[in-house]
Amino acid sequence: MKYAWINRHTSRWPIRLTCEVLSVSVSGYFAHRSRSTQPGTPELKRISAAALLTHICTIHAQVRQEYGSPRMWRELQHRGILVGRERVRRTMQQHGIQARGKRKFVVTTDSKHTLPIAPNLLDRQFSVTTPNRVWTSDITYIATAEGWLYLAAVIDLFSRQVVGWSMQVHMQTGLVMDALRMAWFKRRPAAGLIFHSDRGSQYCGHAFQEALKDYGMTSSMSRRGNCWDNAPTESLWGRLKVGRLYGKQFATRREAMDEVIDWLMFYNHRRLHSTLNYISPMQFEKNWHAAQPQCAAN
């Protein structure tokens, strides 16, 4: 209100004098005037506690309870709701709104074999500057009343996008072969791509290694028993299981498959990824492609 009053009377009294009388700093007044005159700048209004809680509850339901307060705050920002990070944290804490809890899962890698092992070419260099340069892959499992469902995924490290996946009732080579084929048909990468995995028998086998050669890819494998060498894919499993599958009981494998596919679509298209400055994998890659003509012109 004080700033508005000063704006109406700048022609009658000096700004510095008016600010002094109203106990307003001159710099604060000019900062306010700068914000209000910039085109496209949203008006800063304090959202009510009830409205903020409604927005948080809506997002919490939409993302299936997957966001904690940092990611929730980012999502609110993306939706044009200007609110402080600490206020979001307090609101969620006061109303018992929290992300699903963490849980430990069993390792599925079978590295007790005599098949050839590829060197660790990736060497934990997880930051990649262009698409289709490094892919990572791994296998996990999901419990259902009908028995285990096994899931293999292929991730492009550039955008952390899941570019290929397969779900089957077994954990044999065909599982990872199908995920690889899906990724290749979707992306058609140039020769020289590094394909990183653990040293499980499915990836070390002759059939899979020959497929990599046919696609012009080079195999890379983690060290024995070292999950950190394939951390991005391990992280994907954590997000899937903690964010969506934990606590759920599936009567059939089909039910589990539908849930996983729904989450993969959410992950690729909508989930805010901290490594990508809190935008989704698809949006990150879209932004990169849009910037390429500008880079070439410069």
Image: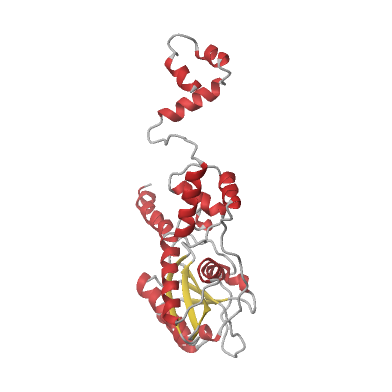
Residue at far right of view:
225
Q: Nearer the viewer, residue 244 or 192?
A: 244
Q: Residue at x 53, y 85 (%)?
A: 204
Q: How many marks?
A: 0
Q: From the viewer's perspective, is 111 left or right of 178?
A: right
Residue at far bottom of view:
114
The chosen color scheme is secondary structure
x, y percent for residue 224: 64, 79
Asked if residue 294 can be seen in this view, the reply is yes
Asked if residue 271 can be seen in this view, the reply is no
x, y percent for residue 30: 50, 23
Above or below, 268 relative to 96: below
Q: Quadrant of residue 17?
A: top right
Q: Nearer the viewer, residue 80 or 121?
A: 80
x, y percent for residue 115: 57, 89
Q: Residue at x 46, y 55 (%)?
A: 59
Q: Nearer the viewer, residue 73 or 228?
A: 73
Above or below, 79 relative to 202: above
x, y percent for residue 91: 57, 48
Q: Quadrant of residue 221?
A: bottom right
Q: Nearer the viewer, residue 247 or 158?
A: 247
